Amino acid sequence: MTAHHVPADLPEHIRHYIGGAPADSVSGATFEVLDPVTNQPYLTASAGQAEDVDLAVAAAKEAFDHGPWPKMLPRQRARVLNKIADLVESRDARLSELETFDTGLPITQALGQAQRAAENFRFFADLIVAQADDAYKVPGRQVNYVNRKPVGVAGLITPWNTPFMLESWKLAPALAAGCTVVLKPAEFTPLSASLWADIFREAGLPDGVFNLVNGLGEEAGDALVKHPDVRLISFTGETTTGETIFRNCAPGLKGMSMELGGKSPAVVFADADFEAALDSTLFGVFSLNGERCTAGSRILVERSIYDEFCARYAERARNIVVGDPHDPATEVGALVHPEHFDKVMSYVEIGKTEGRLLTGGGRPEGLDTGNYVAPTVFADVKPDARIFQEEIFGPVVAITPFDSDEEALELANNVKYGLAAYVWTTDLTRGHLFAQGIEAGMVWLNSHNVRDLRTPFGGVKASGLGHEGGYRSIDFYTEQQAVHITLGDVHTARFGAGKDKV
Ligand code: NAD
């Protein structure tokens, strides 16, 4: 294994960013951030409390009420967004280096995520310029049109898996729409988020449009959700956190978008392209360390190819290169944090009592420290097993056989989640029927997770509420005001006009 790479010029401390300037917490409170390879603290971050969120929201509100951003022409905003994309792209090597160090994600995959972040800004720059709104006419009587307006201050709360990319996913449409924002990044991984402030300033985003408060979810996140001047919350994270935020948004009747957990099925029929399905189902759960909301973490395989599939799958999983996240040869890096490592390891132990362990089952050989988990494959997993039902969010997969299309569909839908699904078959009719029967927000047929940015993104059941993606994101960050204009005479019942009524 190569020596652990520590990026040059790491900051020792990172601060909030409020109204165009870095800021420490009013209380001076900080928290420590760990390097997932050594589990040693390597920097402190300001720990935001309610008073820091108040300052950030006040800056965002001032920029919304009195600043130029919400009133700028879409083309002007698009220019800034495109500059942001250029800057992100030109810094992708540094960005992925820092992201990898902070999250433990393999460097090649972190680089792909940085490029995707740039792409999100370009996409929403294009979309906002091309935005058209509805108009309706009643010939000779009325014209009605939609006047789209940014909602106001948006609260953006993001998780620690692929943090920079997921932040871009919310920042790009919110800014394109003309909102001002307060971002609360995940406390495990605040490093890459600290790069946004310089990128935005250099791209010409006016002060106060983007604000960032670091801190714990229960403190900074909670204060942001409850702040009366925050008009909407876009949240990505765990289902249970989503439920808490949902409750806390109720008193303010805030707009909400929730991207939550998953336990997505990959269904492999006997007529599938076996090799393509094998490659995809391996990548689907072991890429991004398995810390992926859309991971195909349950593989359902038709009985006639089950034994061969399990054998080939285990052989490949055994060969996956686990190692230092900065090594370009690494396929699975270190999990983000020792708490998460303990959670994943506890599921590995549970799995040993619930399924047949084909490979993995603990630490990889030679990696005695750091949050490394060997790619772990369990076969013969029953649908009531915890490793079949619960989101593990690590490099652990459950394989289950099926005998008929009906049984496969029942197994696929037999969990509380409904984020993604993957179906492998060469039978066109079966593929479409099956895809449409699956309770999932997104289905990939004979493909792994490749998403066109115009398509809806979101889950059903416990996996989310609302769909972002494409123009739906713009819908979320804007109000659609209906303006009705009468043409010609107004015909109104003449209340109070007595006998002169007609
Ligand atoms: P988490 O729910 O623990 O935390 C997410 C964010 O919410 C963090 O910034 C956290 O500080 C904040 N938070 C926590 N409690 C809060 C509260 N009471 N009020 C306001 N904010 C609060 O999730 P995580 O462990 O960081 O991320 C992993 C989860 O995210 C997994 O369940 C994964 O499936 C999900 N996820 C979903 C998607 C999707 O698009 N559906 C994408 C990525 C991750």
Image (cartoon, grey):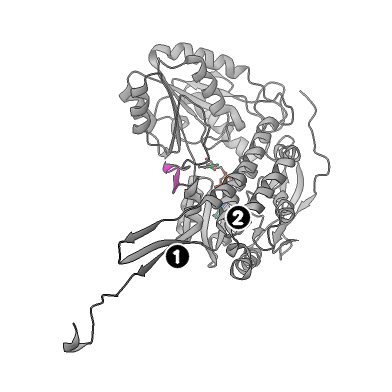
Residue that label 2 marks? 75
162 versus 77 height, above or below: above
In the image, what residue occupies the spot 54% across and 20% down? 279
Expressed as whole percent of the image width and height from the top left, the position of residue 100 reads 70, 37
Q: Secondary structure at mark 1?
A: helix
Of the numbered discs 2 and 1, the one sitting upstream in the chain is: 2
What is the x, y in percent for residue 2? 78, 25
- Mark 1 — residue? 251
Q: Which label was assigned to residue 398?
A: none
Asked whether residue 467 is drawn in magenta, I would say yes
The residue shown at (48%, 52%) is 257
194 left or right of 434 in image: right
> Which amino acid type is shown beneath numbered disc 2?
Arg
Q: Secondary structure at mark 2?
A: helix
Q: Which quadrant would the C terminus be assigned to in this image?
A: bottom left
Amino acid under disc 1: Pro
- Mark whose residue sits in front, 2 or 1: 2
Q: Is residue 216 visible?
A: yes
Residue 282 in percent (x, y) is at 55, 23
Few, some or many residues within 10 Å of mark 2 (<14, 14–19, 20+): some
Residue 221: quadrant of the picture: bottom right
- Tell whether circle 1 marks a residue whose Cβ is less than 8 angstroms from ligand 1: no
Residue nearer the viewer, 339 or 472: 472
> Residues in magenta?
459-468
Q: Residue at x 66, y 29 (%)?
A: 372
Q: Is residue 165 magenta?
A: no
**Residue located farthest toward the left when viewing the structure as drawn:** 499
